[in-house]
Amino acid sequence: MNDEIEEAGAGASGPGASGAGVEGAGVPGAGVEGAVRRRRRAQRLTTAAVVAIVAGVVAYGIPANAAYAVPDLPEKDVDAWTMPLDRYVTVGESSSNYAQLLVVQPCMIEGGYDEYVLPWRDVAAADRADELSRNGSLRLRAFDLATAETRGYHAQSVIDPGFTAWAAFAAQGWTDAKSARFDTCVQRARKTVPSLSDAANRTQSVVRLNNAAFEGARDDPTVTATWADWRSCLQAARVGDVADDPSGMPTRDMVDRFQTLDASTPPTDDELEIATADARCRESSGYRSALYEAEWQRQTTVTHDDGELLAQVDTDELAADDAAVRRVLDELTPERPAG
């Protein structure tokens, strides 16, 4: 297991595990995830090629593993687990696509397509499922007391309860005229909600760097030096089996006994008690602060090639686009159905 509770794909099956519509079915989502998405893929390939050429020119004669210092470091915040590379990651693709379709809706209705009314979706869960499909595990903020007290070691849900309604919406009929209207509405919507899909190549690079920094941090001498105190603290709490180090919690037996990988099951009192004791011991032993500092240091410097890719990013513009998506979701997401 992992100190950051890694999410399993349990319950995330079929197209509902992502933010996309049902591709190839002639659906509203296909306007963004279908025809528009194919155009974006071509744009991403073009963008990647241009970035590669620029990086190749700039980096001529410079080793790929040369150090690149990440600029404009944020203020440290261990509670929020703020990291130097955070600002290069956008909101999830499901959130971005859903926000764009929400803005498209009035334009479609004005065009006479009254059936174009988006149902509620849990886009946060869909974003997590997207991350699982790309990365095999979901990086969350490091395990802390707030997490332990609310859901123990349980995985955060990746199930979108609104997907059934979304699939029905996506299956509505389409004509050439309706598709043309939709394309026009999407172009208008992009003035309000810019497309964030072109960030895919950079996001993959940042995910790789994040994972490498975290894995390296767990074995840092300053971190391993806290293991003994953490273990003694947890043994004194008399919670049963204790792993050799925090990354081994919950133990395999606990995972099976508490069904921690199944987000549909509630945490038991025993699980909450053990998880809470674990989180407190990570704090008191210095493990959590040492892990944060070790990961932070590994994120401040990346390889030259990764640095050249990040140097192409206007982080202020990225943050503004991100804020636009969140604002649309806050203002336009329909109410969740009762029950």
Image: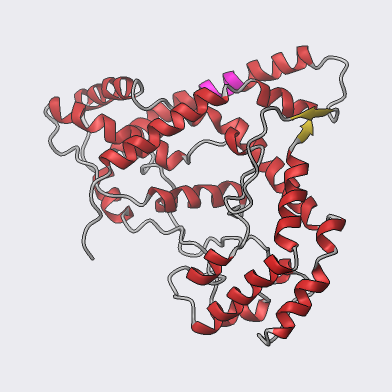
Counting from the top left corner in percent of width and height, residue 300 is at 75, 36
Q: Residue at x 47, y 25 (%)?
A: 40
Colour mapping used in the image: secondary structure
* Range drawn in magenta: 42-47
Is residue 26 visible in the rendered image? The answer is no
Labels in figure, total: 0
Counting from the top left corner in percent of width and height, residue 135 is at 61, 48
**Whether residue 134 is situated above or below residue 9 in the rendered picture:** above
Left or right of 60, for residue 30 = left
Q: Residue at x 26, y 23 (%)?
A: 185
Q: Quadrant of the N terminus?
A: bottom right
Is residue 117 visible in the rendered image? The answer is yes
The residue lying furthest to the top in this view is 57
Q: Quadrant of the C terminus?
A: bottom left
Q: Residue at x 59, y 79 (%)?
A: 256
Counting from the top left corner in percent of width and height, residue 130 is at 50, 47
**19 and 192: which one is in front?**
192
Q: Residue at x 84, y 57 (%)?
A: 222
Majority secondary structure in the magenta region: helix
Left or right of 96, for residue 242 = right
Counting from the top left corner in percent of width and height, residue 109 is at 15, 31
- Quadrant housing residue 182: top left
Left or right of 271, for residue 228 = right
- Quadrant housing residue 203: top right
**218 and 277: which one is in front?**
277
**Whether residue 161 is situated above or below residue 90 in the rendered picture:** below
**35 and 236: which one is in front?**
236
